[in-house]
Amino acid sequence: MLVSNTEGFVAALRAQSDRYHSRHPFHTAMNEGLLDRRQIQGWVANRFYYQENIPRKDAAILANCPDREVRRRWIRRIHDHDGTAEEEGGIEAWLRLGEAAGLTREEMWDERHVVPGVRFAVDAYVNFARTRPWVEAVASSLTELFAPDLMAERLKAFERFYTWIDPAGLAYFRARLTQAPRDVEHALEVVTEHCRTQDEQARAVAALSFKGDVLWSMLDAIDRAYPGSDRQGNG
């Protein structure tokens, strides 16, 4: 049972790392260099649907949030992905990753490679942010607690095993090494401030669990759409 104190609450949130998508067989195979070119391209193209919807998710949180100070800080997430006049942003960085992996911008933007399971999972996440209490939507973003380690491992794997991808295309991963910890700090401040009772904390942990299911379901769908004959070869 969750206890209504900050230490126990944060521990319960961090315990969701056991269900993070870094443990998915497809992700494990990717980090071990076992995916071929078609599988990497399929992952990049489908993951782009998630990337382009992140600002919409964050805009939904902003629309539901009555706290001006939270909004002032949270809006940086939209700038990080959509870009600003000074910086390109994460969506542009992911497009460059796609180009480095042999995809065109057109085929990423027109979503021709997006499989139904990925579309369903991502759309469910955006809908969650729109319809659930804003603090729960903030809590769902806390998969970023586990993201820096994942990004570091992913970057190392791509540089080692997938040398056919131009290293310049890996800029998104490098940027998230610093952005994710900053975002986590703020999100944790929000949920620990607003989730005081056992019920509030339980709903926050459930929201984070839901987000873990979204990410896992995406990889399930990608794995089925882009199976490897024997998980061997790196293209």
Image (cartoon, rainbow, N blue to C red):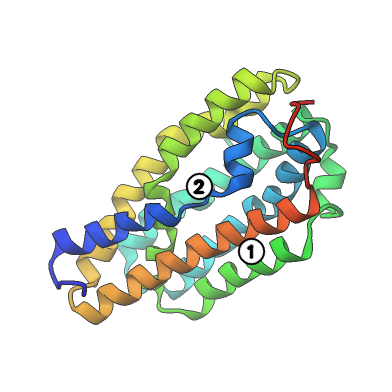
Q: Nearer the viewer, residue 210 or 233?
A: 233
Residue 26 lies in quadrant: top right
Of pointers 1 and 2, the one earlier in the residue sequence: 2
Closer to the camera: disc 1 or disc 2?
Answer: 2
- The picture places residue 75, in percent across and down from the top left corner, at 45, 55
User: From the viewer's perspective, is 80 left or right of 105?
Assistant: left
Give the x, y percent position of residue 128.
53, 74
Q: Residue at x 64, y 53 (%)?
A: 219
Residue at image position (41%, 36%) is: 149
Judged left or right of residue 98, residue 143 is left
> Which amino acid, by three-letter code, is at mark 2?
Arg
Q: CA distance from mark 1 to mark 2?
A: 19 Å
Q: Which residue is mark 2?
A: 23
Residue 82 visible, this angle: no
Q: Secondary structure at mark 2?
A: helix
Q: Residue at x 53, y 64 (%)?
A: 213
Q: Quadrant of residue 7?
A: bottom left
Residue 108 drawn at (x, y percent): 80, 46
Give the vertical position of 220 relative to 83 (above or below): below
Which residue appears at 30% of the width and 60% of the height?
13
Q: Which residue is mark 1?
A: 122
